[in-house]
Amino acid sequence: MKLAQHLPSSENAVKNARQNALLAPVAETGEAVRQQDRWQTKAISVSLQVAAAFAVALIAVTLSEIFARGTLDDIVPYLTSAARPGFVAVAIVALAILALDAVIGRSLQSIILVAPLVVLPAFFSGQKQQYLSDPLYPSDLLFGRQIVELLPAMVSAQPLLAVVVFGGALLALGLIAWLVIKGRKIFVPLSGRARLARLLVAVPVLLGFSSIMNPMAYSATRDRLNIVPMLWDQTINYQHNGFLLAFMINVPMATVTAPDGYGNVAISDIPSDRLPSSFFAGRRADVIFIMSESLWDPTRLDNVTFSKDPMPTIRSHQSGNVFSPEFGGMTANVEFEALTGFTNAFLPYGSIPYQQYIRRPIPSLATFFASKGYATKAFHPFQGWFWNRNNVYQSLGFDEFKSEDTMPAMTKRGQFASDESLTRYIIEEADRSEEPFFYFAVTLQGHGPYEADRYANGAITVDSPVLSAASTQSLQTFTRGVKESDVSFKTLIDWAKKRQRETILVFFGDHLPPLNEVYTETKYMPNVVATRRASVETMKREHETPLVVWSSKRGVQKDLGSVSPSLLPHYIVRMAGYRHPFYTGILGRVNERYTVIDRHQLISRNNRAQADWAQSGQVDPLIRDYRYLQHDMMFGDRFSEERFFPEQQDRLAPAS
């Protein structure tokens, strides 16, 4: 009876088991379909996220190229041509977005950081090219503080543009802040597996890419990607490779490598003067060396008339011209050459020696004259940290640096101290000195931009049928500043003539002023900035500034021609009656053969140019030896110190 009662339930169990066996494959198939759907959905989601990263990267790179180039021309070929590395730049930005997403933990949130970092430097590069003719270099990031200090002058010159720029910047910062705060809700969170996958893909590729970007080392991979470092011509470098890649190419250039053949033997083989420098006792003349901010002769412009000559004193005492290696700015690079006798032509493109390289005692006119018993002082009526002068002047051996921080208050022209006030202060310091002195001064009054209300008096008026009203005003302001500089220089000469001790005055402009459309409207230059590579005639036209070398006992040293700032120490030391193994020896021999030492060309005494000399493979042994000595004292083991720079021995590195 009990067995009978159990039979139906057993039959049910068997029936259920058979049904489950029949349904199991169906369930497994359904679960597999659902799993496949989930994987497909995830794959689509990941693909969309990667596609979005590449789309944003494409937009960012495109905008950066538009801003950096200042034109839409060549953008499409750069991004689409197989012979150009445009898509490589896009891929780098996209991979950077994916890698940072993994770090942040949210998909595409890193766009908030990456996009501005790609676009804004390119915008600044385009702005720099408008005023200084060079693109943005990694070394430019070293002097952001200088730009901030000059903002008041820029704002006063173009207040409407300043309002637009600052308003846009505030709006952009506000948007970025809002996206960061709201990002936790807007951007999709990433799982641990997704973050790891992004890192495993992006980081090795980015690291591998960075390893091939040293332009001084050969890379087959870089060649296959059509990334071509062209350090000898940065304009073409940025045009071909694009802003982002060219900027990255220039990063390793902060490290200076020794020229081929450099060493103790090479330095020992350089001939020095037969007579020791101590044989020439000198005349103990006082020396005042003045670099005048943006001093240039505006009467060189065609189709412009002036109510009077803005620089009669300078013109009547002019010895020649300085061939400036810069245009519209970068004063410190010109100053470096004039004080040391070294040249930027031997340094990486875009270098700023004052910011990057001067970290130990460097020979200069200050150390030379100090070794002869002179008091040495530097003067600049602006803040001492500007262009790192507080530290640099110590490294160059000046006894004292008089800056805005230590000078008495001076009268201003616009935002800047007047040349008249600086000249009076230099004269007061000189009158108090009982020992012979070497003074170096950098003026400030001529600094651009040239706003309308800088000068109260209308000492000079400008008229031109080809200039716009804005250009006429800018040129008139600049010209009135030249006139005041000329009057200040006359004050200095009149004072020097009355002194018993001989006084040598060397006075020159550091570079052409940033007059922008004045140059194009008068057809003085085809662009608002100077050319970097052109014929000798064109280069001199766009880079020459007035030079005066004058002695109260000997008068003007005439017919010097157009000379590089690096050759000025030769004239100064020789005019003071001294001899020196480097300043009158090496530089003297260089000066006999060449007048201009430029990174793109050497200009000889007969006005012939040797273009692209550094890439020719046949460098003049005289230039080679000059380069060896500069590298040796700036970066090397100082094998040459005893023979060529004896005054440097036992100098201690200054405290930073």
Image: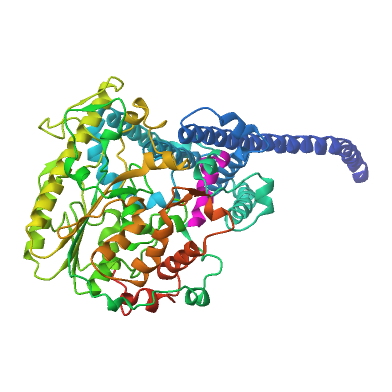
Is 246 included in the stretch rendered in magenta? Answer: yes
Q: Residue furthest top?
A: 465
Q: Quadrant of residue 351?
A: bottom left
Q: Quadrant of the C terminus?
A: bottom left
- Quadrant in which the N terminus appears: top right
Q: Is residue 451 left or right of residue 110?
A: left
Towards the viewer: 438 or 304: 304
Magenta highlight range: 240-253
Q: Nearer the viewer, residue 122 or 49?
A: 122
Q: Is residue 493 above or below residue 528?
A: below
From this view, report whether residue 160 is shown above or below residue 132: above
Residue 467, given in percent of the width and then of the height, sits at 29, 23
Q: Residue at x 18, y 35 (%)?
A: 309
Q: Is residue 616 above or below residue 449?
A: below
Q: Does residue 256 appear anywhere in the picture?
A: no
Q: In the rendered view, does 368 fall on the left or right side of 352?
A: left
Q: Residue at x 59, y 46 (%)?
A: 191
Q: Looking at the image, what colour scheme do you see?
A: rainbow
Q: Position of residue 26 (x, y in %)?
A: 84, 34
Q: Nearer the viewer, residue 515 or 568?
A: 568
Figure quadrant of residue 654: bottom left
Type of secondary structure dominating the magenta stretch:
helix
- Where residue 171 sits: x, y (%)? 35, 32
> Would you say residue 317 sits in the magenta stretch?
no
Residue 427 seen: yes
How many labels sit on residues? 0
Does residue 426 sit above or below 608 in this rendering?
Answer: below
Lateral position of residue 27 relative to residue 592, left or right: right
Q: Position of residue 108 (x, y in %)?
A: 53, 39
